[in-house]
Image (cartoon, rainbow, N blue to C red):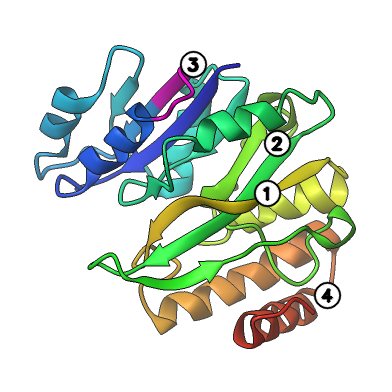
Amino acid sequence: MKISIITAVYNRANCIAQAVKSVQQQSHRDIEHVVVDGASTDGTLDVLHKSLNKNAVLVSESDSGIYDALNKGFLLSSGDVIGILHSDDRFYDDTVLETVAEKFNDPSVDYVYGDIEMVNGDGKVLRHWKTGTLQQGRIISTQIPHPSLFISRKLLMKLIPPFDPSYRISADLKQQLIFANKLNSKGLYLPRPLVIMKIGGASTISYKAYLRGWAESRRAWNEVHGSGGFFYVLRKVISKLSGVKV
């Protein structure tokens, strides 16, 4: 089973090699790493040319944001299963993709997801994000941390493009609302960390980013369900603050 890992990167010469190494160290061998560079100017391309192996796909051109880049990556990919690894993240250990692939041996499984560890720049763990099994298989008061989400190609083909590029932060939530709540796809939860995620991305860089994310979350819910976005965001915030799902 081929797994395609998509990495969108722009000016991350200081950390992209770690992400690439994390992919290459996986015990699962049938991996395609698709790297979409947004025309970096800091030496990122030099690092990529030195570190990527022959099975990788690399494109470098300007884009309109991370979701546009990820959509490009999907079009370039050929795997049976698609996952995302951000340029400053890494897989939790070298067995992650092997474990994920085993779960997709069940043809009824549309997506697999797990937990993540969120760390600061010094590598200190700030949060263990334990996703848990979705209530009745639906997104109700939380969402799946998308770095820990792996989706079958057959499911993503129903979502063209996979991400709505008009969003800056919450296109991943809109995607999940569609496949979990509208398409009633079958997911499988792995109760273990899959990715170590560095704090400081578009959704976690500041309180302003959190506010933008909540506004986009409300919009995503309303676009998929027609109404109720305010109450979804309220449940989401309460869940995050209290540490429980409501």
Evaluate if marks 3 and 2 touch, with contact meaning CB atoms under 8 Å apart. Answer: no
Q: Nearer the viewer, mark 3 or mark 4?
A: 3
Tag of residue 175: 1
Evaluate if marks 3 and 4 touch, with contact meaning CB atoms under 8 Å apart. Answer: no
Q: Which residue is mark 3?
A: 30
Q: Secondary structure at mark 1?
A: helix
Tag of residue 184: none
The first of marks 2 and 1 along the sequence is 2
SS majority, magenta? loop
Q: Which residue is mark 4?
A: 228
At label 1, the amino acid type is Gln
**Residue 212: within the magenta?**
no
The first of marks 4 and 1 along the sequence is 1
**Could you tell whether 215 is left or right of 156 in the image?**
left
Evaluate if marks 2 and 1 touch, with contact meaning CB atoms under 8 Å apart. Answer: yes
Q: Which residue is mark 2?
A: 159
